[in-house]
Image (spheres, coloured by chain):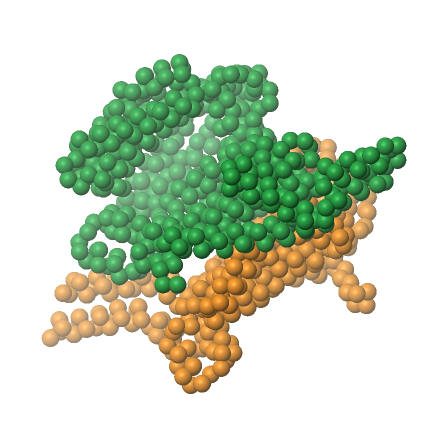
């Protein structure tokens, strides 16, 4: 195994060396930084040319200059990589350090949403193969596949951001919208649940009724201006989460798991007010992180104390329930911040921005206001990226699950008399995840490299913007810095994908025979 | 005795319901015929095929066509992108100018009747006919797409099949070369070429994008060849003394053609999105040439006042990409022998009644 990894790393560094060499030389001959100066009539023209030549080392031919750049990169091995200077005077390392978190922030949430949504919808469509739900989701996923992101972005800006901001001026949902939403949610849930005609209509009416009344309630109570969940709703939702997670993970028949999860839901209520106190008195990321750790620790203890045998699945179920319920508390805190956020001068009741990564005018030390500002700016790009990339996950997880369901071990599992839940969640779902995991890894690296268009549409300044700046402004060090990060990431992701595949699927062995 | 007879009758019904079509499917048909039949049963794919053919014919006959200055065909549309007709005032919502004259609502329903009018998609800032601009842009995008698909498909198939068939050292070298190509961004090549040779036009863009678009396909084809070369029929051919060339072209390639065709369609739909995206950020087709991405980039700010300048190019991109995706889906269904057939409602009903009868008689 180690030999395999080392050999692959060796090959990868040779590939990176080759492509960066070619890239450097191509970029170097793709423009002439002195072109403007040569034409200028400035009296100290020659001095400017000389200083720029010295600054960019233009007297060294590009192939040799590449090795000067490479020497800096080799500093990685002594812990001091030197990416060189950018033409605007700052170091490339500094620009990269600013840009990388921005790009990761941009794509991380969207990738997670796309994966969760795409895989769950893909699995439902596979289980309801050739149903109306399957056909409509196939159509939707093909449509998303075919959408250019720059086109969707303009539509989202107009119809999601600007109309939502206009709507907030007078937040009453029109009756037509309520009916439409109710019908949509009725059809959606009824086609997922499926079954006989009776269950279909039952699901349809209950889903439509619930959705319709929730929206009406929100509309009448002015919830959109001052949202929040409150301890009661959070507890109710946590109980729902406890039941849902237990059913999916070990089945409701496992009483110990159910009791442990419900205990966690109850603890959410008990810890709600202390959590509010911490949020207000000690705002910051560290307390939130510490509270997350405490939540998981408590969940482990609760899970262990409720279980006698077969502890791992029960503890796992408890942890998932706890994390999701605690997430609700955080969401609630963000919702409470919504009203003060809208009242600030920088926002002035138009909270969904169409462009940028932060509000420049928002000048407040408040941790929660700043965090909410980041979230609202993430909203549009995340929706756009999710819409475009989740289609692929739907198609892929559907196809893989259908293939898995045809395997002999599924028939064996059914023949043993296992419940349908165990067959789907344990035998089919886990095997479906094997190829999907490797795709996710490669995809994530690809998305970071391909953020150029998204960033330019939404006016973010991340890696894509730096790349563009380097390319158009003849800023070789900057360009190569971005390339070095994205290319390394993409080849490493491929290696990780291969290793993951062999770790997850015992039938595949890397490097064993060869 | 009557009882027994009934049972056998029913089993006959059920078996004929489920197997008859499957039998008919295999009986005396070549692979091509089976694939064609299955493809034509996929309604969405056939419809999309119709849409694509319609768009291609519609778009490529709309404008004047010149080839090397010798061959000149007149287009059916009255304006060309170079014409500067007068900007239309009046009749437009919100005091805008140059709004579209296309009308799809018949007079009976209160519309202006079905017709294109003078400027169906409206006019741009200086009065150029937007319909002819969109036609030109679609022509560009379609031809770029075809070139990328052809080049990428050919290189990918060749590299993948050589690497999968010969394995060993050749495979290792070719696959590392593929990794190498993946890491080089196509945009860089574009800007280098653009700097040295000036703007060489859309066809050149298509050419170099095609040179970089084959990596995914070659990996797929390689995988397919690796599996197929271990199959019995390949051994049989080898024992019979067939040459490598014959085995590759006569035995393996026809079996891998499904995978190739399906991924080429995906490559095509990806190519049109890539070209429009590159043109949108200014690294693809550049002015004075026209491309759908370029049109969207130019007029995205006029979305609130003159939305038609934004809608029509986008609609063409989407309908082309969507149709190609559906055709690809149909082809995948048609080529995949393991694919379970879609069972029509009538057949499902028939076999269900048969099963019920059989159960009742048990």
Residue A247 as seen in the image, left or right of residue B252: left
Residue drawn where x is 57% and y is 51% of the image: A17
Can you tell which quarter of the image residue A459 is in?
A: top right
**A236 relative position to A155: left or right:** left
Determine the image quadrant of residue A163.
top right
Q: Is residue A196 above or below residue B96?
A: below
- State the residue in front, B246 or A167: B246
- Quadrant position of the C terminus of chain A in the picture: bottom left
Name the residue furthest bottom: B240
Judging depth in this view, the residue of B320 and A299 nearest the camera is A299
Q: Looking at the figure, which quarter contains the N terminus of chain A? A: bottom left
| Relative to A51, B112 lies left or right | left
Specify whether residue A267 is in view.
yes
Residue A264 pos. (x, y %): 25, 28
- In the image shown, does A234 or A98 lie closer to the viewer? A98
Colour green belongs to chain: A
Decide: is B41 above or below A312.
below
Q: Residue at x 72, y 49 (%)?
A: A61
Q: Color used for chain B? A: orange
In the rendering, at what x and y percent does residue A183 appear?
40, 38
Image x and y of residue B72, in percent: 79, 65
Please name the residue shown 29% across and 64% down the image. Answer: B350
Image height check: is B18 above or below A480? below
Find the residue positioned furthest to the left. B1
Q: Position of residue A306 (x, y in %)?
A: 17, 32
Identified at 65% across, 55% down, the residue is B141
Q: Is residue A42 left or right of residue A268?
A: right
């Amino acid at each position: 195994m180690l030999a395999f990894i080392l050999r692959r790393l060796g090959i990868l560094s040779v590939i990176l060396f080759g492509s960066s060499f070619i890239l450097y030389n191509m970029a170097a001959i793709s423009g002439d930084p002195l072109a403007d100066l040569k034409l200028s009539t400035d009296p100290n023209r020659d001095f400017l040319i000389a200083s720029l030549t010295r600054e960019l080392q233009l007297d060294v031919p590009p192939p040799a200059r590449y090795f000067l750049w490479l020497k800096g990169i080799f500093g990685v091995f002594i812990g001091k990589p030197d990416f060189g200077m950018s033409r605007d005077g700052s170091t490339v390392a500094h620009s990269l350090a600013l840009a990388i978190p921005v790009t990761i922030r941009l794509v991380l949430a969207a990738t997670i949403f796309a994966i969760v949504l795409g895989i769950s919808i893909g699995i439902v469509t596979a289980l309801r193969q050739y149903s109306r739900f399957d056909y409509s989701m196939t159509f939707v996923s093909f449509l998303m596949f075919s959408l250019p992101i720059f086109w969707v972005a303009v539509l989202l800006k107009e119809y999601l951001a600007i109309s939502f901001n206009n709507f907030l001026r007078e937040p009453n949902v029109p009756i037509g919208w309520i009916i439409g939403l109710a019908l949509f949610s009725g059809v959606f849930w009824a086609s997922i649940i499926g079954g006989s005609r009776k269950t279909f209509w039952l699901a349809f009416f209950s889903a439509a009724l619930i959705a319709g009344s929730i929206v009406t309630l929100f509309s009448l109570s002015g919830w959109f201006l001052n949202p929040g969940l409150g301890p009661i709703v959070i507890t109710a939702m946590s109980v729902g989460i406890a039941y849902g997670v237990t059913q999916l993970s070990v089945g409701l028949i496992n009483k110990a798991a159910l009791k442990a999860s419900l205990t966690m839901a109850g603890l959410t209520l008990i810890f709600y007010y202390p959590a509010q106190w911490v949020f207000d008195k000690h705002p910051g990321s560290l307390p939130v992180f510490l509270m997350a750790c405490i939540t998981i620790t408590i969940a482990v203890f609760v899970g262990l104390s409720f279980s006698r045998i077969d502890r791992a699945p029960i503890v796992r179920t408890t942890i998932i329930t706890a994390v999701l319920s605690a997430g609700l508390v955080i969401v609630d805190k963000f919702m409470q911040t919504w009203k003060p956020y809208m009242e600030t001068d920088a926002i002035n009741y138009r909270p969904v921005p169409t462009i940028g990564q932060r509000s420049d005018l928002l000048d407040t030390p408040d941790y929660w206001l700043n965090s909410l500002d980041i979230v609202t700016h993430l909203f549009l790009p995340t929706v756009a990226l999710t819409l475009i990339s989740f289609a692929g996950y739907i198609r892929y997880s559907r196809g893989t699950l259908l293939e898995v369901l045809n395997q002999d071990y599924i028939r064996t599992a059914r023949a043993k008399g296992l419940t349908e839940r165990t067959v789907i969640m344990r035998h089919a779902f886990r095997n479906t995840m094997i190829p999907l995991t490797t795709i996710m890894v490669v995809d994530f690296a690809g998305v970071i490299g391909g953020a150029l268009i998204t960033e330019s549409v939404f006016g973010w300044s991340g890696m894509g913007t730096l790349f563009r700046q380097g390319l158009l402004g003849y800023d070789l060090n900057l360009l190569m810095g971005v390339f070095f990060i994205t290319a390394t990431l993409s080849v490493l992701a491929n290696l990780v994908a291969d290793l993951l595949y062999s770790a997850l699927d015992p039938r595949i062995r890397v490097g064993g025979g060869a | 005795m009557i009882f027994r007879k009934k049972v056998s009758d029913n089993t006959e019904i059920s078996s004929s319901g489920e197997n008859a079509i499957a039998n008919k499917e295999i009986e005396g048909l070549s692979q091509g015929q089976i694939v064609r039949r299955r493809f034509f049963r996929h309604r969405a794919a056939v419809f999309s095929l119709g849409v694509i053919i319609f768009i291609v014919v519609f778009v490529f006959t709309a404008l004047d066509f010149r080839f090397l200055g010798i061959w000149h065909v007149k287009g059916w549309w009255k304006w060309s992108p170079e014409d500067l007709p007068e900007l239309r005032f009046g009749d437009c919502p919100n005091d805008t100018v140059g709004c579209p004259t296309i009308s799809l609502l018949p007079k009976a329903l209160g519309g202006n009747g079905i017709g294109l009018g003078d400027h169906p998609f409206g006019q741009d800032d200086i009065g150029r006919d937007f319909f002819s601009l969109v036609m030109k842009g679609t022509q560009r995008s379609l031809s770029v797409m075809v070139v990328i698909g052809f080049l990428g498909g050919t290189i990918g198939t060749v590299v993948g099949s050589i690497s999968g068939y010969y394995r060993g050292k050749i495979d290792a070298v070719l696959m590392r070369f593929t990794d190498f190509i993946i890491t080089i961004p196509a945009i860089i090549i574009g800007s280098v070429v653009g700097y040295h040779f000036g703007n060489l036009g859309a066809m050149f863009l298509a050419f170099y994008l095609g040179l970089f678009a084959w990596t995914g396909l070659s990996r797929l084809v390689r995988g397919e060849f690796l599996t197929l070369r271990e199959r019995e029929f390949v051994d049989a051919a080898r024992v019979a003394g067939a040459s490598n060339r014959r085995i590759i072209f006569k035995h393996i390639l026809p079996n891998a053609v499904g995978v190739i065709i399906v991924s080429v369609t995906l490559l095509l739909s990806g190519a049109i999105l890539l070209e429009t995206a590159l043109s949108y950020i200014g690294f693809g087709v550049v002015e004075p040439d026209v491309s759908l991405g370029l049109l969207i980039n130019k007029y995205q700010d006029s979305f609130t006042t003159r939305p038609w300048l934004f809608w029509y190019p986008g609609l063409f991109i989407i309908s082309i990409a969507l149709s190609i995706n559906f055709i690809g889906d149909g082809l995948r269904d048609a080529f995949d022998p393991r694919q379970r057939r879609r069972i029509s409602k009538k057949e499902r009903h028939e076999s269900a009644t048969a099963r019920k009868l059989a159960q009742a008689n048990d």
